[in-house]
Image: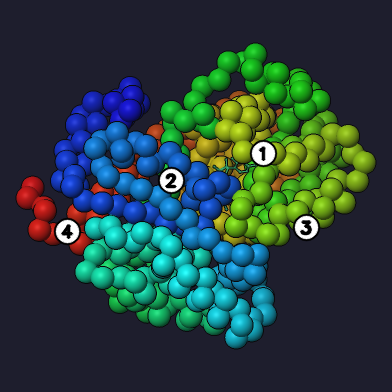
């Protein structure tokens, strides 16, 4: 399977990846996060694990399981770490710890390397023995609520190393080694592979969207931090001047209890505009791929964003992207070179109009975008950096380069 990527990244890279993987053979690696589907972390793990297995690495993936109260608390953590005001009781922290402790008994943590993703399962580290533990933070911690961050810090310090998606998010008060590793997309996956035009047309036809008129699309979970209401407001401003349609498509994530409520708010904002299409979708990568490929402009108007895989997904498909000037988005888009960064609803509306009216400029940005993703955000680079991190941090004995 890794060999399939040679046509994109070159055979030399494949040989290098395989030789690094060789050093990890015989080591058991376990990933733990909080959901098998929905959101960027599950997206990456779903694609990464089979590729690493194809290089002979013994890598597994499990999830922490909890009840509705636990996911309620972890969603509040998530919001608060992004700077949203939330109220916490002592019981919230208790629920968090109890659920982590119960999972310590259920999950087989007996691996050479345990790779924990995001805050939900962070306290599993209480079961650390003499094996290597890494914490991967996918979220933007620049403005995090102190109470939650300090609570998490007691666990972070027990890890061997942690990984952030941006130098902005790294912390000066953490003493363990910190790695900067950007997320990535899989160019060969159903989400990102080339699609037949007929299939793309059919998807739009089935949703009753006119592929001949401009289409503005945002693909995101229904989450306030993705600002779907702001997207509709920007569309409405554009619509006064230019004919266009809006697609807001997203599914839920198993660990996100707020999705249904936000979906209702979005429907309310849509009112009866037949050119606004709010699509609540079951996980379907080909469908998302087709929606991205058939759109005129892709938006990611997040208020906070650890990275925003949807941006690289769109750029890879040579689509012009307008995204908020926040968090990890800034590594994917250099303003006016390979996309546009906006700071407001008005700015977003202005750029949408500009891209619809000037397709040549849109194509210029998009082509630069594709090249930027090819150089920086493909899954093969991501795998290489993880493997090197595992080798350098915990398994110094197996390095003999
Ligand atoms: N996604 C999807 N279906 C949806 C909504 C999102 O497959 O209905 C995917 C999207 O294509 C991307 C991931 O979920 O691969 C979202 O990752 P991102 O980093 O953009 O945001 P997160 O949800 O992790 O905050």
Q: Earlier in the sequence, mark 4 or mark 2?
A: 2
Q: Secondary structure at mark 3?
A: helix
Q: Residue at 19% of width from left, 54% of height from top?
A: 391
Question: Residue reaching furthest bottom?
Answer: 90
Task: Measure the C-alpha gap from mark 1 to mark 4.
Answer: 40 Å
Q: Earlier in the sequence, mark 1 or mark 2?
A: 2
Where residue 61 sits: x, y (%)? 40, 50
Q: Residue at 54% of width from left, 74% of height from top?
A: 96
Question: Residue reaching furthest front?
Answer: 105
Where residue 233 sits: x, y (%)? 80, 50
Q: Secondary structure at mark 4?
A: loop
Q: Secondary structure at mark 2?
A: helix
Where residue 121 sits: x, y (%)? 46, 65
**Residue 15 location, quadrant:** top left
Task: Measure the C-alpha gap from mark 2 to mark 3.
Answer: 27 Å
Q: Earlier in the sequence, mark 3 or mark 4?
A: 3
> Which residue corresponds to mark 4?
395
> Which residue corresponds to mark 3?
261
Q: Secondary structure at mark 1?
A: loop
Q: Is residue 108 above or below residue 37?
A: below
Q: Earlier in the sequence, mark 2 or mark 3?
A: 2
């Amino acid at each position: 399977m890794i060999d399939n990527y040679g046509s994109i990244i070159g055979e030399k890279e494949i040989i290098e990846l395989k030789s690094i993987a060789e050093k990890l053979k015989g080591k058991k690696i376990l990933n733990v996060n909080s959901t098998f589907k929905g959101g960027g972390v599950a997206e990456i793990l779903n694609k990464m694990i089979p590729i690493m297995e194809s290089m002979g690495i013994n890598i597994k993936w499990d999830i922490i399981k909890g009840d509705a109260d636990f996911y309620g608390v972890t969603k509040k953590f998530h919001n608060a770490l992004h700077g949203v005001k939330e109220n916490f009781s002592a019981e919230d922290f208790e629920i968090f710890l109890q659920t982590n402790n119960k999972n310590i008994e259920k999950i087989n943590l007996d691996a050479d390397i345990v790779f924990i993703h995001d805050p939900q399962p962070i306290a599993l580290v209480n079961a650390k023995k003499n094996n290597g533990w890494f914490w991967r933070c996918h979220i933007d911690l620049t403005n995090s609520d102190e109470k939650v961050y300090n609570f998490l810090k007691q666990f972070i310090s027990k890890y061997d190393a942690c990984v952030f998606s941006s130098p902005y998010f790294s912390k000066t008060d953490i003493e363990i080694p910190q790695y900067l590793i950007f997320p990535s997309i899989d160019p060969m996956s159903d989400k990102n592979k080339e699609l037949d035009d007929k299939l793309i047309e059919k998807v739009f036809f089935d949703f009753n969207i006119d592929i001949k008129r401009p289409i503005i699309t945002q693909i995101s979970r229904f989450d306030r931090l993705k600002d779907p209401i702001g997207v509709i407001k920007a569309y409405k401003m554009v619509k006064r001047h230019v004919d266009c349609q809006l697609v807001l498509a997203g599914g839920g994530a198993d660990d996100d209890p707020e999705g249904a409520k936000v979906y209702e708010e979005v429907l309310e904002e849509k009112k009866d505009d037949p050119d606004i299409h709010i699509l609540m979708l079951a996980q379907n990568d080909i469908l998302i791929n087709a929606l991205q490929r058939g759109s005129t402009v892709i938006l990611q108007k997040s208020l906070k964003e650890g990275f925003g895989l949807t941006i690289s997904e769109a750029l890879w498909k040579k689509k012009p992207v307008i995204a908020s000037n926040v968090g990890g988005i800034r590594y994917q888009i250099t303003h006016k070179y390979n996309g546009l960064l906006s700071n407001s609803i008005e700015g977003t509306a202005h750029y949408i109009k500009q891209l619809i009216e000037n397709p040549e400029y849109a194509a210029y940005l998009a082509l630069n975008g594709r090249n930027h993703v090819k150089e920086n955000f493909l899954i093969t680079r991501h795998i290489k950096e993880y493997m090197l991190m595992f080798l350098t941090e915990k398994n110094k004995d197996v390095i003999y380069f």
